[in-house]
Amino acid sequence: MKEEVAIIGVGQTQYRRQHSNLNTAELVRQAATAALEDAGLGLDAIGLIVGGVAPDALAGINHLDMHAISRPGIPYFRVNTGGATGSSALLAALSWIHAGRCKAVLVVTVERMGHASSAQKIFNSIFDPIYEKDISMSTISMVALRATLLMQQYGYTLEHWAGLAARNSASSMLNDTLENPRFFTAEDVLKSRFLAWPIHALEACPTSEGACAVVVTAKSLVGSRKAAWILGARGLSDTYAIGDRLHRPEGSLVDLVTLRRSAEAAYRDAGITNPREALDVVEIQAPFASSEAMAYPALGFCDEHDCVSFTENAIEQKAGIAINPSGGPQASNPVSATALIRIAECAQQVRGLAGRRQVDGVRKAIATGQGGATQFSTAVIVGNQQP
């Protein structure tokens, strides 16, 4: 049998548009030191370091992890799955512990995209220039395409997207890791300019920098420490080409097939049959409101017949589950770190250490990760009780 695994340390820097006063190594040191101190462990107890860094071009710095994250005398490797990098790094850490390679892993993710003049150019050129050139596919137009399909198929409106964005904005005001949280109403969202119809500017995540770290250990090292036990953790990849996902029988472009299958597998691992009853908190890796709505049915919170009504309840915080109490990626989205932040936030919730954003009585929580063109999907479930 595999030994149970838990998160016993969490460290986060402040998240802001640009950390002009700290270099990458200083950001990493700040997050890693906080995580180790929270865990009550020294670096000598760590048997592996996993670095999560998305494409170098986003930061404009080549191999920034090599001089900022790796440490002499400790095994190290880097993980990159775009926006899912942080959660994929955690899955890699679990593999080492379950394989008996070590008892404790430090997972560190860092993002410096605020320093790169090329970041938006990268986002605008990530799709096939021949196959998808007719619609000038970019990150924003991909989200707009999906949001439009959701509106056509299920009856979503611009007001739904604005409502979700405003709710996440309000939640972010309680998040002390955000240096400059943005507060706006649904009306403010609807008055902001369109980036690509139906996506308003205030619905989109801001450029963000920062670092997040967690200490993951086998049960034998947990002792009396406050732990977020990992009850289920799965991830799957999909085809990158958007066109290949439009009409396939297993699920269309808006069905998030890999997230659904990852969540179903994680639920089986955790013994969960009814996620809406079993889970208290969800942190969704969704940099846009429509992306969050797409995740609801994939996570088993609703089906296509009631997804709009569930979304309306979610806007009013009456869905029976706390959704993105941190404000989620719409409040801050440091790409390399954002999926690990979702896990860290869930871990703090079940440990009762989430500060002003703490939800009462949290027992279990789920964090998602999405990378590429939702090519990579992960689902991680944590709980306050040892399995």
Image (cartoon, rainbow, N blue to C red):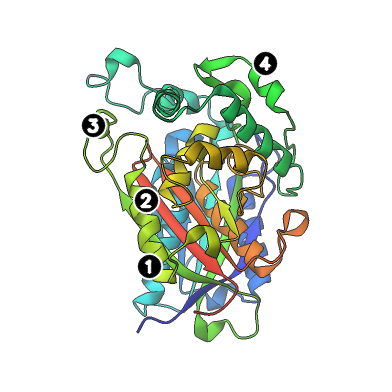
> Which type of secondary structure does the marked residue at label 1 adopt?
helix
Q: Position of residue 325 (x, y in %)?
A: 66, 50
Please report whichever mark, 3 or 2, sits nearer to the chain's N-terminal start: 3
Bin the neighbour count of mark 2 within 10 Å (Cα to Cα): few under 14, some 14-19, many 20 and up.
many
Per the model, the C-alpha gap separating discs 3 and 1 is: 28 Å
Q: Nearer the viewer, residue 89 or 302?
A: 302
Per the model, the C-alpha gap separating discs 4 and 2 is: 34 Å
> Position of 79 compared to 72: left or right?
left
Name, please, the residue furthest toward the front.
305
Whether tag 4 and tag 1 are in contact, CB under 8 A, the answer is no
Per the model, the C-alpha gap separating discs 2 and 1 is: 12 Å
> Which type of secondary structure does the marked residue at label 4 adopt?
helix
Bin the neighbour count of mark 3 within 10 Å (Cα to Cα): few under 14, some 14-19, many 20 and up.
few
Q: The residue under label 4 is which amino acid type?
A: Lys
Residue 372 sits above or below residue 152 on the image: below
Residue drawn at point x = 23 percent, y = 31 percent: 247
Residue receiving disc 4? 191
Closer to the eye: label 4 or 3: 3
Please report whichever mark, 3 or 1, sits nearer to the chain's N-terminal start: 3
Q: Which mark is residue 260?
A: 2
> Which type of secondary structure does the marked residue at label 3 adopt?
loop
Q: The residue under label 3 is which amino acid type?
A: His
Q: Which mark is residue 247?
A: 3
Report which quarter residue 54 is drawn in.
top left
Q: The residue under label 2 is which amino acid type?
A: Arg
Residue 119 sits above or below residue 346 on the image: above
Report which quarter residue 131 is drawn in.
top left
